[in-house]
Amino acid sequence: MTAHMATSAPGTSHTGNIRPPPTRAVGRLGSEDFHSAPLPATQEAAVLYAANHPEGAASLLRAEIKDAAGRNNKQAWLMLFDLYQALQNRAEFDALSMLFTVKFEQSPPAWADSTDAANDPRRSAQSRERKDFFALKPNAQGDLAGEIEKFVAFAQSQGTVRLDVSRVVSISGEEATLAAAALAKLRKQQFPMWFNHLDSLEKVLRAAFNEKSADEQKPYWALLFELLILQGKGQEFEDLGLEYAVAFEVSPPNWETYVNPVAVAAKANAPEKPAAEAESVHGEVGFALKGVLSAASSNQIAELNAFAASRTEVPIDLSKVLRVDFGYTSAFFDAVKAIQLAGKRVILAGLNELNAALLEALGVNRYAILVRRKST
């Protein structure tokens, strides 16, 4: 169905105490310059969701559908349904359904059954991401060592952990040693771990190579070796080992293999698609992207580019995409734009309302046809 966009820009009353997303000031959204005019409420909520602030997005959408100018904005309603489904908030979903039926005199979107949700990797992945997420950052006193200890305790209490290191902009040698030891301990226990923005921490560590003396550098090398092991980057580990041997004239650490038992079990239990079905997914329906699209999705984008190379029309199925991480929006925009500029017709299909609004805010609709999934 085609959703109607609100014609009026939201006022400050829509946001309340919600911290505005990074797109509210002059800057870059996607890969192109944009104006500093406020985003429509729906697009602003989509940006908040992409930045992993679902509660802030929900507050903004609730304010929109109560506002005199926004209450007829069906897109905001549908986005709120998608958000409650993603958050597994059945009570709010049902309450919204009653209001929707009265307001629009039509059936609301259907709630996905709990059995479907339990078998849907998108639901389990998002539930895990919400519950076991830990952002490593200095405390108010600038101390990171205490936060590393909290990270280990948090991980062990949850049973799995998703560590975000995007806010680590500096680290001392002692803190690097503590972090390397903590990660190595969990790795050797085959503790289920996932990571966000390790590339930013790697840059911090490499910068320390140039800023510190030879003896002061070693903790940073040790942590970087550990990060490469955790990511399974064998070739990068060997390259770093050569650099280490030249710098210190001693043998580098030995490569070790990290096994994430949850990820291995999920892969083993995933049903294999018959050849005909696989052709449907990567053929008529389109190339299927899935999960949270982030810097860790580079392999999916590489496969997409290979899929697109021999085609004049490139259908891309986004029905299994939870969200496009805000930090990855520029790269995703550039990938779609590059395919279109190569003379190909790009179709992004199966979009939920949250992801559709985000792509509209990015301007992706100038380079691809956006097809929403049927909501009602």
Image (tube, helix red, strand yellow):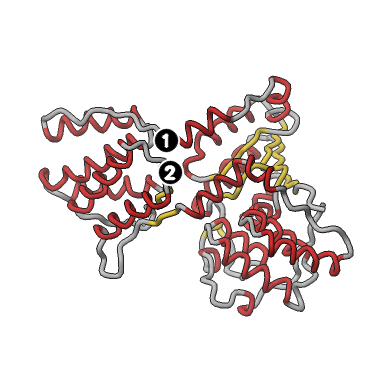
Residue where numbered disc 2 is placed: 194
Classify residue 279 by image quadrant. top right
Give the image location of residue 179, x and y in percent.
26, 49
Q: Is residue 285 left or right of residue 191?
A: right
CA distance for labels 2 and 1: 9 Å
Classify residue 358 by image quadrant. bottom right
- Name above or below for residue 297 compared with residue 2: above
Q: Is label 2 in a helix, a strand or a loop?
A: strand
The three-letter amino acid code for the residue at tag 1 is Asn
- Name above or below for residue 68 compared with residue 226: below
Query: What residue is at 25 percent from the left and 63 percent from the top?
Result: 143
Q: Are marks 2 and 1 in contact (CB under 8 Å)?
A: yes
Query: What residue is at 86 percent from the left and 65 percent from the top?
Result: 104
Tag shown at residue 260: 1
Give the image location of residue 332, x and y in percent.
56, 45
The three-letter amino acid code for the residue at tag 2 is Trp
Q: Is residue 165 left or right of residue 109?
A: left
Give the image location of residue 146, x and y in percent.
26, 60
Tag shown at residue 9: none
> Would you call the spot at circle 2 few (<14 residues within 10 Å), some (14-19), or many (20 or more)?
some
Q: In terms of depth relative to the viewer, which is nearer, 35 or 51?
A: 51
Give the image location of residue 13, x and y in percent.
63, 79
Query: What residue is at 72 percent from the left and 48 percent from the top?
Result: 113
Q: In terms of depth relative to the viewer, which is nearer, 372 or 108?
A: 108
Q: In terms of depth relative to the viewer, which is nearer, 73 or 368?
A: 73
Which comes before the other along the chain, label 2 or label 1?
2
Query: What residue is at 66 percent from the left and 25 percent from the top?
Result: 273
- Name above or below for residue 74 compared with residue 222: below
Q: Is label 1 in a helix, a strand or a loop?
A: loop
> Would you call the spot at circle 1 few (<14 residues within 10 Å), some (14-19), or many (20 or more)?
some
Classify residue 353 by image quadrant. bottom right
